[in-house]
Each structure stands twice: as structure tokens, then as C-alpha cells.
Image (cartoon, rainbow, N blue to C red):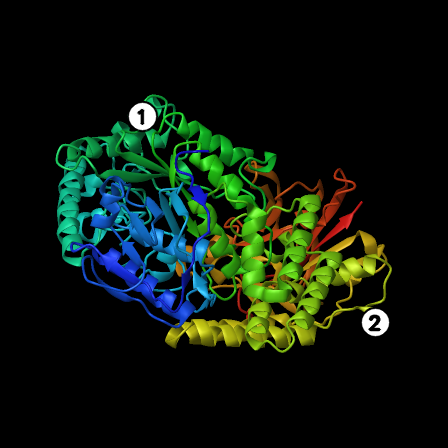
Amino acid sequence: MSPGTIRIISLALTGALLCTAAPTIRLAEDASIAEKTAARELAEHIGQMTGSVPAVGVEGTPGNGPTLFVGQTRAAAQAGIKAAELGAEEWLVKSIGDSLVLAGGRPRGTLYAVYHYLEDVCGVRWWNPWEQTVPTPKTLKLAGLNLRGKPTIQYRDIYQFYGSDGGRFPARNRANRDGDARISADYGGCRDYGPPYHVHTFYKYIPPKKYLETHPEWFSEIKGRRVAEHHQLCLSNKELRKVFIDKLRVYIRQSEVAAKKKGTPAPIVYDISQNDWGGQCQCAPCQVIVKREGDSEAGLLLDFVNEIADAIRPEFPYVYIDTLAYQYTQKPPKTVRPRDNVIIRLCDTRSNATFPITSETNTDFREFLLTWARIAKNLRIWDYAVTYAQPRGLPYPSVDTYADDFRFYAGHNVEGVFTELEYTITADVRDYKVWMMTKLLENPNADFATLQKDFTDGFYGAAGPFFRTYRAALRRSQDLRKAYIGMSPGASAFSFLDFETILTSQRLFDEGDKALAGNDTLLRRWRHARLSLDRATCVRWRQIAGDYKRLGKSMGDFPLDRARIADRIKQTWTEQATMRLTGNGRARSLTQLNEEMVKFTALPTNLSSPAKFRDVPLETIFDFTADLTRNWQNVVKVVKDPEAESGISNCLTFPNSAGEKQPLAKYKLPMPWGLYIPLDKNFYAKTDIKPEDVPGAGYHWYKLGTHKLQPSMYLYFFWSWIIQLDIDSASDVNNPDAEFDIWGRIKFTGPAFPHGKADEGNAIWVERVVLVKQ
């Protein structure tokens, strides 16, 4: 067992305290703010459990009954416990006669001791900030306890939990950062980044508005010009390095003063990292370093960061500089190595989230990590546990990969994990995923099945077994299909959500409804667990209807009711927004709900095949309508169009919401479109629609070609790729070498395009894509 793993030395619950003799809680005279919170939390929960709130006082104050010593007390020292020598998050719970010591290192160890006692011994559970389970036993277990542990992953950050509660929920579940929110001194503070921010800080140190005019040499040189908008900095510039060093020293000193006033730990990690785009400097001195390091931009970045790390180490030997291996800085350098006070943060932008890092599917990121682990002492991971393309939050199996990932990380120099897991209402079973993630970040060796049963039976009651069966059904289907679910999959990518899987899953939720009949609280939670499935059912309605028809079935016998499911979505979303959100956040969420409800009903439930393919065998046709595309920043709108056979179309107008970034001049024919495979960065196929290819006004079918589908393959439109469509879902798992004709139905309007009318607005319309299996 690894040193960081929680170690339960012994747990013999042989003694008990009768509720008639309430215990007292005693703190050291010099108790920290967090230790006082620990005592308060312990007293409040014991009060909820027994009906009698223990008195809290300073050690030495007389009291009746057994004593619970919280923090670095004299009683702990007399028992041989050197609490001051424990790590910052190391904790222990130890019986001393009929009393109990709950102690740990500072700042969070004692809090964790209390929370482990309440969870592991008393059975308390904090499911989310609004809902918890507090048992009401007749006795409190105090004797025969000897527990000790510390988290495996040192930096545990979920972006972001549920909004700011001062850090109570993260602390109770042993996370030590809460995204951009803060964990207050009451809950031990957080393992935070210092200013100016935790990522993409180049322009926060050197804002172009302030420095471009007076110091253009600090900014990227591109084709002989110094530029700033959506570019980087000139990292070889010696004066720039000195400015960073001076500013960083100021940030550190200011942060330490501010932390002392708040009573929180001062930050020990400061980010210096590239902006969130390309535009790296091409000047000769920068490129000399890049070439020296084997064409590695990371070599230049590390040369820059190492000099800063060396400069601040004498005064601040405990401070770390964090930077990114991301996009153009992913390739490790040939010779330069990160200093011991430098952390490299690896961003997992390409993995299939439904499989662990150890799987063959995710070889790319695994090798990326291993390569950096060979040269870097300190690594962190920036991960993604949600999907970002609309509609966000469709269901996919992933929780069963967490432990494998975290164990692998811990074994390869990874000391911290930052995970984006937003969207408190619409993310797939988010309460379940957040809770499981916190437990497995703390202890990746915990038994998955035990944890899963703990949450599902505790949170969903009698429906828990149905939930586990549902998630197992998703896993079985995905193991067969192996759909690529990366950061931004469109709805069509979720091919494992086929008719059989969705029908099975919906029926499991129906059984759960019956099991929970009469319990409004559990039914509300159960509806929320179903929300991602319900949304997927509506969004993928035509795909699952196609599956059904390919089975030779009549839609008159289709066993699902879209209107009923849509009504349930509205009920669930509204009640969750009322519970979880306030003010503008709630209003925005309900606006999103209304927009989705319109989209869910924009197309008829039973859409006929396009006229061009009416005589083609139904089982060979895969029809992708405009509601299934992935549109960049919503520049391309999905609109109703009476000329579209399906009733809706993607429409790119000129001008558009992107302004000069997407001008008409760049979209005049020829129009490129093609196939891309992100898993191996393969530009698989490309062709152009030329002016002479347009036979007349209105919609026409254009053929991209005949191609074999590959995992993760998508179709893109235009030079900008601002329309993308995942098409690998049409692949046949029983015939992976099958080829498909790929067609798009497109029209061009306005005087800028062939056959366009002068009184029409300039626009390109992409109604649908059809694949025909050969």
C-alpha cells in the first residue's frame, strides 16, 4: 500500500457511550480557526444524532462524561501522539480509555479526523451542500478506535463544486480547493494558487494595453512584427524575465500578508503559463532555443520558467512555479529539465473519458504523461469530467475509470488533479460523480463497488440497485461500441445510447419510481439522476427511432413517449434550479431549459428519409439532422427553414455574431469540407465545393466521397471548421471495414454565391448529412 493511502490501523467498535451521558468536547488553548470549526462540526452532528449537543470548551474546563479531545491537545501529547509532526492533512482518531482523541496536522488534519470519525464510525454522509444523512443511533461509538490516514493525491480540486459555501462541502469531503471559489480559514483554507490567477497568466503579468506600446519587444514576433492580440510573449527577452521575477516577488509577499490576516495558509504555488491560444514568438533568439530543444516550444517555456524559479528560491524556498504542457507546449524538451520547484501541468484534451488512462484507447495521453514523468519531479493533471458541446451532460460511463486514473497518476509523479466538472443541474448524475471523485482522490485504493453502493443506496434509497444496473448497462454498451467521448462530443457521438440501451435504462428508472413511491425527497433525487438520460432520449430521438425501424418495427408500436419525457425534463430541471440556484443563475438556467424544450420538439417524432434516398434500404441509411451538429460558439445557428426537408437547417449568415473573425470574404466558394480523426490527429479526407458544382438555387446534395469510418471521426465544414458532426456512430461493430457514401444537403443564398438572388441575405445553409452503407 502506498504511503499516501489512507491507513485504517484498526477499527474495533467495541465500546459505546450511552446518550444519557453526553460527552464533552475539549480544544487546546491555542486551537486554530479550523480546529475550532472541527469541534463545532463534531458537536452539531452529535447533537443531530443523539438529541444532545455536547459542550465545547478549552482543555482543562470541567465536564461530565467521556471527553472528545479535538486538535493538538495536551491529552493527545500525553497519549504519545505528536500531532505537530503530522502532515498538513494527516489525521488520526484514537481511543484513550473512555475518551477519544481526534487530531491532525495543520491546517486541515484535525478537520479531516472529525469528518472521518463522523463518516467512517458514525455513518454521516454529505451528499451535496443541501442534502445529508445523519443517523440517529442510541449510542455513540468511542472505544477501541485507532484510525489514521492522509490523502493520496495532495492537490484535489474540482471546478467547481456547487457555488461558494465558504468551503464547507469540499472540506467535509476532503477536497482542498474549490475552483475559483475559496475555502475559508474556518475550513482550513485551500491549497491555492497565488495571484494573479491559476492558469493562462502571461497577459495578466504583462497586459498588452499597458505594455505593448512602450515595450513591443516583450511580445511575440510574427513575420517581423510584434503583435499582442491572441498571441504570446517573447520568452527569450532578458528584461521581460526580470519583470516577471520582480512581479512574482511582489505577489508572494502580498499573498503572505493577506493570508496571515485571514488566518489561512499562504499560497505556495504560483502560475506562469501561456495564454489559451497559439501565437508563440517566432523571433530568432526564441527559435534558437526551440531548435536546440528538438523543436520543442516547451523547451523555451521551461528555460524561461526555470530562470524565474531559480531567482525566487533563495527567498522563498517553499514556493513552486506552475506552468502548462498544453497545445503547442506539449512536446517535452530535449535537454532542459524542470527545476525541483517547478510543477508541470498536463492537460488531457484528447482522451476518451469513458476509458481509463491505462486502456489502449488512451495510449496517447498515457505516453504523454510517462514522457514528462521521466524528466519532471512534480506533475499535475488538468482533466475534464464533463462534455462541452451542446447539449452538454448526456450520460456516459466514467466513474469506474477514476480509481485507475488516480492510481496511475500517483505512481508517476502526479501530486495534484484539477478537474472541470461544471453544470450542477445538467451534468450527467453530477452529485454521484462529484462524491465518488472526492473519495477516490483521497484514496484511489478504496473499493469501487463498496463506494458505489454506499452512495447509490444512501442517496437513492430502494432505487439504488436500479441505478447501479443502469450504469452497468451504459458500460456494457460503450464497451461494445467504443464511441469516442472526448471534451466536446456532439449528440451523434453517443452511439452507445442506442434504442436497446435507452429503452432498458428508461425501464429501470420506471422500476425505481415504483420502489420509491410515496417518498417525495427520494423521487426528486431519482428524477434528477434520470435527467441526463431523458435529455439524451429526446436529443437522440431520431437515432433511436432509426435503430427501431432497422429492427423491422413500426413506429406505431414505439415504446417511448417523447412528450411525456419532455414534461419530466421540465419538471426536474425547474425543481433543481429552484433548489440549487438563485438570482441570475437560476434565470439563465431556466432560459436554457426553455431553449432546449423548443429544440426537443422542433422536428417531428418520426422523420422520413430524405427523398433522394427513399429507395435505398432503410437499414443502410444514417441520417444526421442539423440539431446534431457541433457549432463553434453558436456562430452558426440552427433555424427553421421551410425549404429544408427536415424543417430545420444550420445557417451561417453574413455578417454574423463573430464579426470580422468570420467575414464573408473567407467563405466564398470554393468551400472546403472533410473528415478528421482527433484520436491520431489524422486529416483523413478533404474536398471542395466549387462554384461550378452548384447546379442552381436551393438545396442540393453534394458527395464528399466513399470512406471507411474510424473511431472519433467527424465531418467538418468550411476552412474554419465551425460546423462539426461526429459520424463514427454509424460504424458497424460487426463489420468495421464497411465503407459509406457521405452526402451533405447544402444551399447557398445571396449575391455572393452562385445562383444567389440580389435581394437575399448572403448565407450558407447545411440542412443534414446522410451516410449510406455500401
**Amino acid identity at mark 2:** Gly
User: Which residue is depicted at the point 26% across and 52% down?
Assistant: 71
| Number of numbered discs visible in the structure rendering | 2
Of residue 451 and residue 279, the one placed in the foreground of this image is: 451
Q: CA distance from mark 2 to mark 1?
A: 66 Å
Q: Is residue 763 above or below residue 602?
A: above
**Amino acid identity at mark 1:** Arg
Rendered image quadrant of residue 713: top right
Of residue 523 and residue 482, the one placed in the foreground of this image is: 523
Left or right: residue 80 versus residue 354 is: left
Residue 314 in the image: state x and y as whole percent. 13, 32
Left or right: residue 124 versus residue 36 is: right
User: Which residue is depicted at the point 58% across and 46% down?
Assistant: 354
User: Which residue is depicted at the point 35% across and 66% down?
Assistant: 21
Residue 117 in sight here:
yes
Residue 235 in the image: state x and y as whole percent. 25, 35
Looking at the rendered image, the quarter that the C terminus falls into is: top right
List the residue tagged with mark 2: 556
Of residue 65 and residue 411, the one placed in the foreground of this image is: 65
N-terminal-most mark, 2 or 1:
1
Left or right: residue 686 versus residue 657 is: right
List the residue tagged with mark 1: 337
